Image: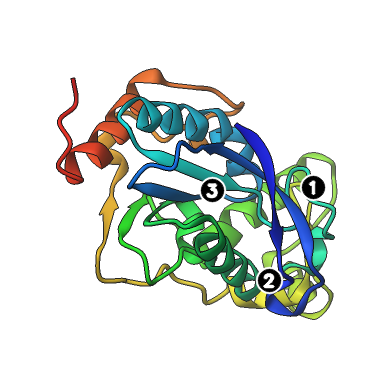
Amino acid sequence: MISTWNNPGCGGGPPTEELLVAFDRSRAVRVLVCPAWYDEANKLRRFTVEVMRRLDAAGIDSLLSDLPGCNESLAPLQNQTVAGWRASMDAAADLLGATHVLAIRAGALVAPQGLPGWRYAPQSGPKLLRGMMRARTIAAREAGIAESSETLVALGRETGLVLGGWPIGASMFRELETAEPALTAGQSEIAQSAIGGAGLWLRAEPDHDAGQADRLATIIVESLGNPVA
């Protein structure tokens, strides 16, 4: 279930070995999972793996790779870019033989465009940045520190910025200001309203909702024409 794959050095970076969580039984349908980012990745990690467990039970392989710089990756997070992460996901899709893609939240920004699949509650780069910057300014205010969003944006563009404890490099910051999930033929959007309840990324702490995992997996399985028992 837990292994690694060799990232060939996408986006101009050096080759890296990245962690891979996989339910891999060499079946016909193989879903590459592009995870949520930053704090949302922490809040949605269990949910993501639980959806993968349900896909496995339905006869579908799923493959969840770390993004370079995240989790157990040895690549520096501050050196990562949207373009580099997109190239890494393209490489993972090719090397792992993915037939479909499931992009979760900001993962939709780097989902391989040549694969059919699903985008669950996709998030744009500007919305991601706004949420993280708002959290920083609120924390600064509570600590008696005055920070304006204008100052933070200028700093982020020039030298990068630490948001929520995550070091975001200047290149990544500038890319996120305009990054939008691509509308790709063969990929359908799954809104949170189709899952029911509020998104788990809105909760204060990491949590799980088995019902939401059931419903997301069911939508995916049924869209492939497989009945769900």
Residue drawn at point x = 54 percent, y = 48 percent: 35
Q: Classify mark 3: helix, strand or loop.
A: loop
User: Up-down: is 52 above or below 186?
Assistant: above
Depth check, front residue: 144 or 139: 139
Report how far apart the C-alphas of labels 2 and 1 lie in the structure.
17 Å
Q: Which residue is mark 2?
A: 81
Q: Amino acid at mark 3?
A: Pro
Answer with mark 2 or mark 3, whichever residue precedes in sequence: 3
Taking 31 as reference, is 151 left or right? right
In the structure shown, which secondary structural element does the residue marked by tag 2 occupy? loop
Which of the two discs, 2 and 1, labels the residue nearer the N terminus?
A: 2
Residue 153 screen position, x and y as percent: 70, 72
Marking on residue 35? 3
In the image, residue 223 above or below residue 93: above
Task: Name the residue beneath numbered marker 1.
Answer: 165
Residue drawn at x 35%, y 27% as measured from the top left = 212
